[in-house]
Image: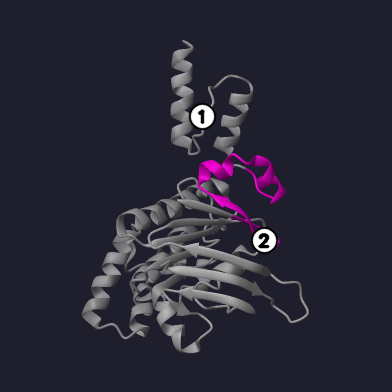
Amino acid sequence: MAIISVQDLTFNYTESGFPALSNVSLEIEKGEFLAIVGHNGSGKSTLAKHFNGLLTPTSGKVYVCGMDTADENNSLDIKRHVGMVFQNPDNQIVTTVVEDDVAFGPENLGVPSDEIRKRVDEALVSVGMKKYAQAAPHMLSGGQKQRIAIAGMLAMHPDILVLDEATAMLDPMGRREITDIARKLNKENGITVIMITQHMDEVTYADRVVVMKNGKIEFEGDPKRVFSQSARLTGAGLDVPPAVALRNKLICEHALAPTNAVDTEEITDDIYREFVKRGIV
């Protein structure tokens, strides 16, 4: 059974307004790294807020770990299963000491003190922030604050981590750091990761990419399949990552043999091998 099941989901922010989501259906498997991409207003963040019950359907159903998000009796259990990290980490940091902030979630769940201490230490290690345990959050960089926000979610031991535009306010290095943490948590800890973004270079390592447009799923597939459909991405207000654009240009100019590589390392290796073959290096 899918860990999240979205069935004919329609959502209106107001009764008379145009639906932000229209008849969306999606199955997310346990342990999957799913990227949901789309231009501003595509509905991707509205969809994400249905994954932990922040929003509930106008019509249709959303099930998380078999629980109906529209049933208020399931609200707390669903939030225990799903951790969400948003665009601005300052909105999620509630204390003046890093380790106290990470402990805030499990304390509210009634976790025993000894277990909280263990969870906080493990979470800070997971995001590379253990040495900042006693630091003041407001003294940290944006990327470091976002790591603390992720640690706070991890300390609650969620099955699912949703990053809702969590890298939008970061520079390229910060975005890469958060993406790498998400990959590690997915591959090494088995956490289901859902990344909501419009930065296409962040989704090259996803198992599956869902492209949204005007409140609907436009198309989906693994990154290689999605990036091969440049015209459809452009129609959804998106571009292929810069490395893929370079790959396509080199192939069109016959400077590189056809390849479906999508991440920077693979493309760099392909270019190097081509240059070696041609005696350029």
Instruction: Give residue 42's mark.
Output: 2
Q: Tag on residue 259?
A: 1
Q: Nearer the viewer, residue 194 or 5?
A: 5
Residue 4, horizontal then vertical, whole percent: 47, 69
Q: Looking at this view, is 53 or 217 the one in front?
A: 217
Residue 28 percent across, percent down from the top left = 47, 63
- Disc 2 versus disc 1: distance between alpha carbons? 30 Å
Asked whether residue 16 is drawn in magenta, I would say: no
Residue 220 sits inside the magenta stretch: yes
Q: Is residue 140 visible?
A: no
Image coords of residue 85 (percent x, y): 48, 67
Q: Residues within 10 Å of mark 1 (few under 14, many from 20)?
A: few
Rendered view: 188 above or below 78: above
Q: Amino acid at mark 2?
A: Ser
Q: Can residue 247 be seen in the rendering of this structure?
A: yes
Q: Residue at x 55, y 72 (%)?
A: 49
Relative placement, left or right, of 122 versus 272 is: left
| Vertical relation: 54 (above or below) 138 | below
Q: Position of residue 26 (x, y in %)?
A: 54, 64
Residue range in magenta is 211-239
Q: Residue at x 39, y 53 (%)?
A: 183
Residue closest to the eye, 153 or 13: 13
Q: Secondary structure at mark 1?
A: loop
Q: Quadrant of the C terminus?
A: top left
Which residue type carries mark 1? Thr
Q: Name which quarter of the figure residue 246 lies in.
A: top right
Relative to 14, residue 273 above or below: above
Which residue occupies the extreme top position in the image?
279
In the image, residue 271 above or below residue 145: above
